[in-house]
């Protein structure tokens, strides 16, 4: 085998591998790795974390230099007197602890925002992936329905030629085929929209080709609910944890504002040098702040911090009520869709398939009319199409529930939620 043949086989093999790799797990990994919105939130969380040590630290010292210019003639003969000064500001000790604790609360809140963003990207990626999957399956069903109608039209044509069926049967079959062509066209648009959305989440060009796994996904195998589903509530939500961190931060800000009544200090050391400096040209100084304007400055800062804490607590209460309603709504929707999909799988689709097969044989034998055959055909394909539409809605509701609750309640991929 020549080198050129090996290269061609290598390219074909890589393409096949790529096609097999675009599974839900692969979509999640790629989205976490390349999504720019997630990268922005992570950078913000990293920045807040890096600031913690600086808030516990002293401010930078100050170094000064002075040269005396207003001197007498005798002093000028000895040369100008010069001095250098170094000073350091010291806040009241408890303020360093409060400032560091405030930054730790900010970093904690940013971390919760990052984790919620990851679950948001997960929900969008998985729901879009399965929306694309369902759109592909529905497109295949429409093509299959087109072929079925072609067979029905052929049966009607044979029966018309034999004089056992009117020409209207054949005409109705052709009308149904035209309708299916329209539905295929509309479904192509649905497929493109899902493709564009999924590519955007993966940071690819909108029209990049997508090759998804050909595996048939089912609720029992790929999206089965876990034992945690029935007991899930809002306490584990990263949105709620973020608001709790905000309340903690506001409380610490209030404590720090009250500490502004306490004095800060400035320690300095001065050393003279030059031809005219005195022999004992050293000086040590200490300064202390006085809250002289406490009626207007410190008092207003404390009042503002108290209001900020009240606002944070009210926001937390509002978030609890909103999350409680949202999670209960999503749980109810997931349970309903899960039961509905089970009915489709175990009853509706098998029954509709059996009805179509029976109607096709009966029509060929002249025991039922053409309209009954068309109704059976429409029922089967509409039922199967509805199944995939509801499957897509089920995934969207389930991933939305896991996003809001902050935990996994199914066997859907849940990689990368920790940072």
Image: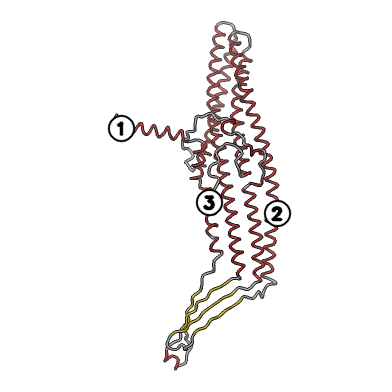
Q: Which residue is pictured at 66% across the width and 34% down the height?
A: 335
Q: Earlier in the sequence, mark 3 or mark 2?
A: 3
Asked whether the viewer can see residue 393, the reply is no
**Apparent side of residue 217 relative to residue 296 in the rendered image (left or right):** left
* Local SS, label 1: helix
Q: Which mark is residue 146?
A: none
* Local SS, label 2: helix
Considering depth in this image, is 160 or 295 the residue closer to the camera? Answer: 295
Q: How many residues crowd around disc 1 within 10 Å: few (fewer than 14), some, or many (20 or more)?
A: few
Q: Quadrant of residue 10?
A: top left
Q: How many residues crowd around disc 2 within 10 Å: few (fewer than 14), some, or many (20 or more)?
A: some
Q: Earlier in the sequence, mark 3 or mark 1?
A: 1
Point out residue 91 in the picture as x, y percentages from the top left corner.
Answer: 59, 71
Q: Which residue is pictured at 55% across the width and 73% down the height?
A: 89
Q: How many residues crowd around disc 3 within 10 Å: few (fewer than 14), some, or many (20 or more)?
A: many
Q: Which mark is residue 314?
A: 2
Q: Which residue is pictured at 59% across the width and 11% down the height?
A: 361
Q: Which mark is residue 42?
A: 3
Q: Earlier in the sequence, mark 2 or mark 1?
A: 1
Q: Quadrant of residue 414?
A: top right
* Inter-mark Cα distance, 3 to 1: 45 Å
Q: Are marks 3 and 2 in contact (CB under 8 Å)?
A: no
Considering depth in this image, is 399 or 179 the residue closer to the camera? Answer: 399
Asked whether the viewer can see residue 201, the reply is yes
Find disc 1 in the rendering and name its residue.
4
* Inter-mark Cα distance, 3 to 2: 27 Å
Point out residue 75 in the picture as x, y percentages from the top left corner.
Answer: 45, 91
Quarter of the image with the N terminus in it: top left
Point out residue 416 in the picture as x, y percentages from the top left corner.
Answer: 53, 44
Q: Are marks 2 and 1 in contact (CB under 8 Å)?
A: no
Q: Which residue is pictured at 56% across the width and 50% down the height?
A: 114
């Amino acid at each position: 085998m020549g080198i050129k043949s090996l290269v061609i086989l290598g390219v074909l093999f890589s393409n096949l591998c790529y096609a097999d790799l675009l599974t839900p797990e692969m979509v999640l990994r790629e989205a976490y790795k390349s999504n720019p919105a997630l990268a922005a939130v992570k950078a913000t969380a990293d920045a807040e974390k890096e600031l913690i040590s600086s808030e516990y630290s002293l401010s930078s010292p100050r170094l000064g230099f002075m040269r005396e210019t207003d001197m007498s003639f005798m002093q000028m003969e000895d040369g100008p007197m010069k001095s250098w000064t170094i000073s350091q500001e010291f806040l009241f000790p408890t303020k360093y602890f409060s400032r560091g604790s405030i930054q730790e609360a900010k970093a904690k809140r940013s971390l919760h925002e990052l984790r919620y963003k990851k679950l948001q990207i997960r929900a969008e990626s998985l729901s879009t992936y399965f929306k694309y999957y369902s759109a592909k399956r529905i497109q295949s069903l429409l093509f299959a329905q087109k072929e079925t109608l072609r067979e029905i039209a052929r049966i009607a044509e044979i029966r018309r030629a034999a004089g056992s069926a009117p020409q209207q049967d054949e005409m109705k079959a052709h009308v149904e085929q035209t309708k299916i062509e329209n539905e295929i066209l509309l479904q192509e648009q649905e497929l493109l929209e899902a493709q564009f959305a999924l590519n955007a989440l993966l940071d690819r060009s909108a029209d990049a080709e997508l090759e998804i796994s050909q595996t048939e996904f089912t609720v029992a195998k790929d999206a089965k609910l876990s034992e945690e589903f029935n007991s899930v509530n809002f306490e584990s939500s990263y949105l709620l944890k973020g608001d709790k961190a905000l309340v903690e931060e506001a409380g610490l800000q209030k404590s720090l504002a009250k500490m502004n009544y306490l004095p800060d200090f400035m320690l300095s050391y001065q050393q003279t040098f030059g031809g005219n400096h005195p022999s004992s040209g050293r000086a040590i100084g200490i300064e202390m702040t006085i809250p002289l304007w406490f009626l207007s400055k410190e008092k207003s800062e404390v009042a503002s911090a108290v209001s900020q804490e009240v606002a944070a607590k009210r926001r937390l209460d509002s978030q609890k009520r909103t999350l409680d309603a949202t999670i209960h709504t999503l749980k109810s929707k997931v349970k309903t869709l899960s039961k509905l999909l089970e009915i489709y799988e175990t009853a509706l689709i098998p029954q509709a398939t059996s009805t179509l097969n029976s109607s096709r044989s009966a029509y060929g034998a002249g025991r039922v009319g053409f309209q009954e055959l068309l109704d059976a055909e429409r029922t089967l394909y509409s039922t199967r199409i509805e199944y995939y539409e509801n499957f897509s809605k089920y995934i969207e509701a389930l991933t939305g529930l896991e996003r809001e609750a902050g935990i996994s309640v199914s066997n859907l991929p849940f990689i990368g939620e920790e940072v």
